[in-house]
């Protein structure tokens, strides 16, 4: 299938599909005319990429985890491979740290807002 067909089958635009290829996440076969040729495995791969991206994983991490996700009854399921577990632990810690930073920012903004509202009321 051509890139437009893959885009339609996955709901992912062509530009993103090309980006996934640049990142090494997709490796379509090239036809003699240079066109990309995708197969049904690429549809599953794109769904896996989207699944992992939804979890907040960067494409650099996803590249090493593609083999750890498989399709099962029309849904994607992570396998218990060691690489997946350690990567998810690292990313969970990274996200928790980001959340803590955002909470601190929110608390600071809330304090500034409360002070500004009090000043308006004086």
Image: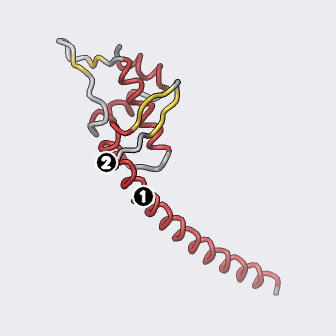
Contact? badges 1 and 2 (CB < 8 Å): no
Q: Where is residue 98 in the image (x, y as percent from the top left)?
A: 49, 65
In 3D space, how far apart are the residues under numbered discs 1 and 2 (Cα atoms)?
16 Å
- Left or right relative to 36: residue 108: right
Residue 43 percent location from the top left of the image: 41, 23
Residue at position x 42%, y 49% in the image? 57
- The quarter of the rendered structure image containing the N terminus is top left
> Residue at image x 21%, y 14%?
31
User: Residue 26, position in %: x, y?
Assistant: 30, 31
Q: Nearer the viewer, mark 1 or mark 2?
A: 1
Q: Upstream in the sequence, badge 1 or badge 2?
A: 2
Which residue sits furthest left? 32
Label 2, on which residue? Answer: 60
Element class at badge 1: helix
Q: Is 62 rendered above or below residue 107? A: above
What residue is at 42 percent from the left and 58 percent from the top?
A: 89
Q: Is residue 115 above or below residue 92?
A: below
Few, some or many C-alpha atoms within 10 Å of disc 2 (few <14, some 14-19, many ≥20)?
A: few
Please tell me whether residue 100 is drawn above or below residue 20 in the rendered image.
Answer: below
**Residue assigned mark 1:** 89
């Amino acid at each position: 299938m051509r890139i437009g067909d893959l885009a339609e089958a996955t709901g992912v635009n062509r530009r993103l599909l090309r980006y996934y290829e640049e990142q090494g996440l997709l490796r379509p076969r090239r036809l003699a005319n240079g066109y990309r040729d995708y197969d049904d495995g690429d549809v599953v791969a794109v769904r896996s990429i989207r699944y992992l991206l939804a979890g907040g994983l960067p494409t650099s991490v996803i590249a090493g985890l593609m083999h750890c996700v498989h399709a099962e009854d029309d849904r994607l399921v992570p396998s218990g491979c060691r690489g997946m577990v350690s990567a998810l632990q690292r990313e969970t810690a990274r996200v928790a740290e980001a959340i803590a930073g955002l909470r601190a920012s929110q608390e600071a903004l809330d304090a500034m807002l409360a002070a500004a509202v009090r000043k308006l009321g004086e």
